[in-house]
Amino acid sequence: MTLVLLPHHPARDWAEIQERMLVPLYEAVHERLGVGPGTRLLGLDCGTGLALLMAAARGASAAGAERDPARAELAAERLPEEVPVTPEAPAEGSYDVVTAFHAAFPPALSPAALTRAAQSGAAVVVAGWGPPERCATEPLLRSADRPGAGPEALVARAGLRPVAAGRVACPFGYADGASAVRGLLSTGAFDAALRSAGLGQVEKELEEALAPHRRDDGTVWMPNVFHYVIARVP
């Protein structure tokens, strides 16, 4: 079956297709940390701002840092004025929760960014892929441009010690194959392949790789588990 693919707009595809797949992760971490009124939360590589929007809805004072200008622009459209998004994390600050929900996706996050704006005692949360055998998307990503450091390694490089961890089911579900291709390309995990092989070839290979995950009604379903680590700033 030949898929009809729309123009490649990674930031908008992330906002409209892919980011919602991580809502269970955002909710689980916010609930575990008691994010709410009085919480000052900073989201690193915050994408188009959905996790920040959810934190603000719980009453937190939220802000984000996003290096991709297109994603940052969409975040600014989505978020209220009181939730600012800047290109880099503040050089210093008094945030008591710092999240790095998208550390599983390129570009790799600097360990120093985890603590730059965190106050003493702040919770730092880093998330990544769970066990490969529980991630249906894992085979599609084995040859992709993925950062090598998992949550534990990133936390350790920042000079922090994990105090808690958890796993959350985050299935990737798409209305059809074309949406699945667009959503997966928006993660950034295939950027190196796009540069070397071109969009058409990468789309073709993704279409073939998605075949085992297509249902009879045309939808695509890939169960996944994400893993998060919580550390505390000394």
Image (cartoon, rainbow, N blue to C red):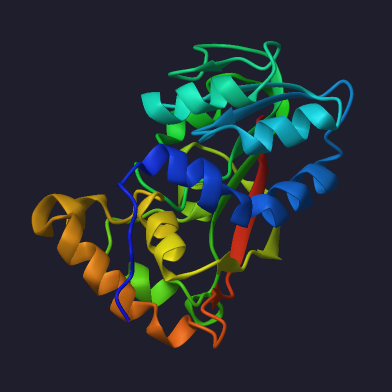
Is residue 175 visible in the rendered structure shown here? yes
Q: Nearer the viewer, residue 221 or 127?
A: 221
In the image, 23: left or right of 67?
right
Is residue 64 visible in the rendered structure shown here? no
Q: Nearer the viewer, residue 201 or 84?
A: 201
Marks counted in the figure total 0
**Residue 107 in the image, given as x and y percentages of width and height:** 34, 41
- Location of the N terminus (image quadrant): bottom left
Name the residue: 57% across, 21% down: 77
In the image, 224: left or right of 41?
left
Name the residue: 53% across, 54% down: 152
**Residue 127 in the image, given as x and y percentages of width and height:** 57, 51
**Residue 191 in the image, given as x and y percentages of width and height:** 25, 50
Q: Is residue 180 above or below residue 207?
A: above
Name the residue: 69% across, 63% down: 168
**Residue 24 in the image, given as x and y percentages of width and height:** 72, 56
- Location of the C terminus (image quadrant): top right
Residue lying furthest left in this view?
A: 196
Q: Is residue 200 above or below residue 204?
A: above
In the image, 18: left or right of 163?
left
Name the residue: 53% across, 74% down: 131
Asked where in the image residue 54 lies, by quadrant, the reply is top right
Asked where in the image residue 64 lies, by quadrant, the reply is top right
Asked where in the image residue 179 lies, by quadrant, the reply is bottom left
Q: Nearer the viewer, residue 187 or 161?
A: 187
